[in-house]
Image (tube, helix red, strand yellow):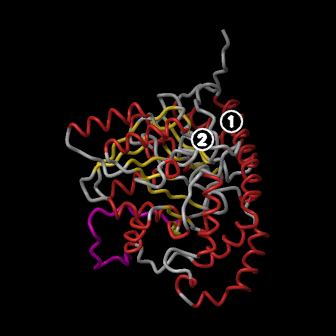
Amino acid sequence: MSLSFGFEFAPGLPAPVSKWSGFPKYNFIGGHNDAAQVPVEQLIAAATAVLAREGSSLATYGLNSGPLGYRPLREFLVRKLRWHAGITCEADEILITSGSLQGLDLVNSLLLAAGDTVLVEEDCYSGSLSRLSRRGVEVLGVPLDAGGLRVDALANMLADLQRRGIRPKYIYTIPTVQNPTGTIMNEERRAEVLRLSRAHGVPIFEDECYSDLIWDGRRPPALYALSNGVGVIHIGSFSKSISPALRVGYMVASWDVLARILALKTDAGSGALEQMVLAEFCTAHFADHVQRLNRGLYAKLETLSAALAEQFGTTAEFEQPRGGIFLWLKLPDSVDTQRLAQIALAEGLAINPGGEWSTNKQRGKTRLRLCFANPDKETIRRGVAALAQICQREFGVPTRIANIKR
């Protein structure tokens, strides 16, 4: 019996989801992290300490810190953003959000209307693409290379749009550990992106959700830092550095932008307890924790790379990412990864097909994204072997093509 009888659903809704029946045996999707690396004991200690000291502040919305979020967490971010990303800002230029996804929604609500044009990276975070699609926005993908967003392509696209009398509402970029490719844009290229942004009067929306996860810990200054905060909105998250389930992100912007954003953030504040615990934990342990996490993630990436080489040889093409939790993989042209994902899921193996992560559907057809953070090493090996068997059986991918030296 349908309980929806009598309800008239609004037009344009996304397709209904299926009931959750647990994680598949080989789970390579989503932004899940390494369960063994969650600092459980330290989070317990942080929760105990901060609740004993400030638990009574839970009686008020905003924890006596106002609508921007728990002030000690924002003060930690002021320090962290300065040494990590080169950003100089004040606590009142930081808004705590319910994950970075809420940041995406708030910025889109502030800046976009149906029919507007935005520029994004050609291979791009699917969450941003789906949100733009639902708003009826024209999305144009800028090609990438091993150094991230290609500035020559960006320059040509901006010039063409200017000739047609179109000014994009923003340029969305993930310059530091790009999702899904894992690239890091160098400082010279960042400066050129900013120059083009100013020349054409198009602001930049900078997403740095993965920027803590860099194997060697070295990175260029954020675009927000290089611009001194002019014409750039910056978002980040604790989801990948601490825990995705905590749902704590943040936005950095000038007060005139945040003042308008706050008028749109009508949720009475993001989760308070999560903010309190994170502030307590991060102040004492963040840097050491991230170093340990990155060592563990890099070891898993090595396991995944070795398994792909063993099972696929040169039929699986990829660039080794410089950080993050994803590998962006190119399979032979005979493989349709959307169909592959459906077949694999029926056999207990979950992958993200590339078409969901690219503005160029033809390009995405043979690509897929693998999240290597959550499975243990043996599960990674077995999962890749199972993936190879499906590719061989369903798409005629050779059992293995070894690298040939001439």
Number of residues whose C-alpha sits closer than 10 Å to that of mark 1, classed few (under 14), some (14–19) or many (20 or more): some
Decide whether the magenta segment is chiefly helix, strand or loop: loop
294 up-or-down from 155: above or below: below
Q: Quarter of the image for the N terminus: give it.
A: bottom left
Q: Residue at x 59, y 75 (%)?
A: 71
**Residue 277 at what x, y percent from top left?**
68, 74
Tell me the quarter of the picture where residue 365 sits.
top left
Q: Is residue 15 magenta?
A: yes
| Amino acid found under the numbered disc labelled 2 | Leu
Q: Residue at x 51, y 80 (%)?
A: 66
Any mark on residue 219, and which?
none
Q: Nearer the viewer, residue 37 or 54?
A: 54
86 up-or-down from 147: above or below: below
Cα–Cα span, label 2 and label 1:
9 Å
**Residue 263 at what x, y percent from top left?**
37, 74
Tell me the quarter of the picture where residue 43 sits.
bottom right
| Amino acid found under the numbered disc labelled 1 | Ser
Q: Secondary structure at mark 2?
A: strand
**Residue 99 at what x, y percent from top left?**
53, 65
- Which residue has dot 2 on it? 327
**Residue 339 at what x, y percent from top left?**
46, 42
CB atoms at circles 2 and 1 under 8 Å apart? yes
310 up-or-down from 402: above or below: below
Q: Nearer the viewer, residue 327 or 273?
A: 273
Q: Earlier in the sequence, mark 2 or mark 1?
A: 1
The span shown in magenta is 1-20
Q: Secondary structure at mark 1?
A: helix
- Which residue has dot 1 on it? 305
Q: Quarter of the image for the C terminus: give it.
A: top right
Is 284 situated left or right of 113 in this image? right
Q: Nearer the viewer, residue 106 or 30?
A: 106
Q: Is residue 330 magenta?
A: no
